[in-house]
Image (cartoon, helix red, strand yellow):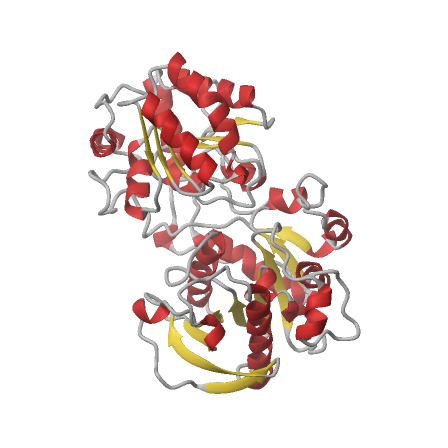
Amino acid sequence: MRILFVAAEAAPIAKVGGMGDVVGALPKILRDMGHDVRIFLPYYGMLPDKMEIPTEPIWWGSAMFQSFAVYETVLPGTDVPLYLFGHPAFSPRRIYGGEDEDWRFTFFANGAAEFCWNYWKPEIVNCHDWHTGMIPVWMHQSPDISTVFTIHNLAYQGPWRWFLEKTTWCPWYMQGHNTMAAAVQFADKVNTVSPTYAEQIQTAAYGETLEGLLSFISGKLSGIINGIDTEVYDPATDKYIAQTFSADTLEKRKANKIALQEEVGLEVNSKAFFIGIVTRLVEQKGIDLILNILDRFLAYTDAQFVLLGTGDRYYETQMWQLASRYPGRMATYLLYNDALARRIYAGTDAFLMPSRFEPCGISQMMALRYGSVPIVRRTGGLVDTVFHHDPTNHAGTGYCFDRYEPLDLFTCMIRAWEGFRYKDYWEQLQQRGMSQDFSWYQSAKEYVNLYRSIYGLPPQEEEQPPQQEEAQVDEPVATGKS
């Protein structure tokens, strides 16, 4: 199939959230499976610092009374063709923000549609979030081009219809009060980044006022769990951690714990229960729950805690002050640092992620990959990737709680702290987590079947390459299937 990914982000050159991971990794795997997949991305001002871009465009177009240029290159480290949408509106060295955000991304979507009609015609356009939401509306008049609309963050729904009618072409048949609402109605298929989240957004608690519409179109709505790059993020080869290890050599992992304690200024104690968190400090991530119970948890136990992330100033201040009350036991790093994040995954005993809502989540997969046992709330993608620890039946990969209440989180953390004392069971828990298959190949198979369903074709089971195979365990593998 000829597939064009249109998105505002693509790792590693332009990444803010999980969308960048999907657009940066999935096309590469789909091309390995034999499909002609390409990416259409804004030409941001910082891109020349990260990659080589030809000086001459391959095509000139016009949309919304503006001229634009399209430059062709490849996504770094892959053979995926990358088309960059060039216009002064995207010259600033930023991805989001600014008073012109609604206009510039509506213009970008219009340019992508013109590109499909006049230069390279795909069979399927995979649109990502509201920035590309008008494309399914426009492609409704082109029966030979199908659309898939992927929802990464339902909270951001794009400009209202009155704005769209003033700035771009709104066909007579268009319905929907904003860009997101129009997209889900006119896309041939709609998917989110986890099966559980696809169900949750049809309820008032998670639907962001679109729950009625999403329930109405539920027949074409599905969820496919995200993956991680299991070659880049591999504890057996990762050069950013102090000591490489695998599920079979967990005894070596202790060196990473000691090295991390030294690095972040905590008391060096391999027997202490060490909890890590790598996150955006925003309400969605459950930071208010953590602030409610962490002081009591640290006073009650001998545990240690390290936090890495940035976000709301209030949460940053509270975490910084809390760390100052527990010198040698808690460290707070208010920054973004991928290398330190890997060392936290590899050096902590448990990883905390009590999200209020979580469309998919990547951090819990990274923690499992590196042997850090997740402590999570059962919501969204966390339900599909972390299974509750059952020591009696030797099953499960983490500790889970249901209600969004401080006491429930506190109880779950205490259970994990007590479970850590039983070293044999804890090691088995780590090994089960490390054996889970979160490779992008699993997600890619689901996307191929989603594309095939547009044409009424049955699911196609493709054999997994030998080098992708990992050990099987009793726990069901999280592949994005309900």
Q: Can residue 188 be seen in this view?
A: yes
- Along the line of sight, which residue is nearer the eye, 308 or 456? 308
- Observer-nearest of 100 and 147: 100
Q: Is residue 180 left or right of residue 228?
A: right
Horizontal side, residue 56 vs residue 189: left or right: left
**Point 47% across, 70% down: residue:** 41
Kindly indicate the quadrant of the structure image that contains residue 175.
Answer: bottom right
Q: Quadrant of the N terminus?
A: bottom right
Determine whether 250 is above or below 341 in the image.
above
Q: In this view, does 56 lie above or below 224?
A: below
> At which x and y percent is residue 429?
40, 27
User: Residue drawn at (72%, 77%), measured in percent from left and top?
Assistant: 141
List the single residue furthest toward the top. 300
Residue 225 lies, with reference to residue 23, above or below; the image says above
Q: What count of labels does the image hold?
A: 0
Residue 463 visible (yes or no) = no
Whole-percent x and y of residue 137? 69, 70
Residue 356: give x, y in percent of width and height.
57, 35
In the picture, measured across the screen, residue 439 lies left or right of residue 249, that is right
Above/below status of 367 relative to 411: below
Residue 220 falls in image quadrant: bottom right
Q: Quadrant of the C terminus?
A: top right
The location of residue 390, given as percent across then percent down, is 49, 22
Q: Nearer the viewer, residue 173 or 431?
A: 173
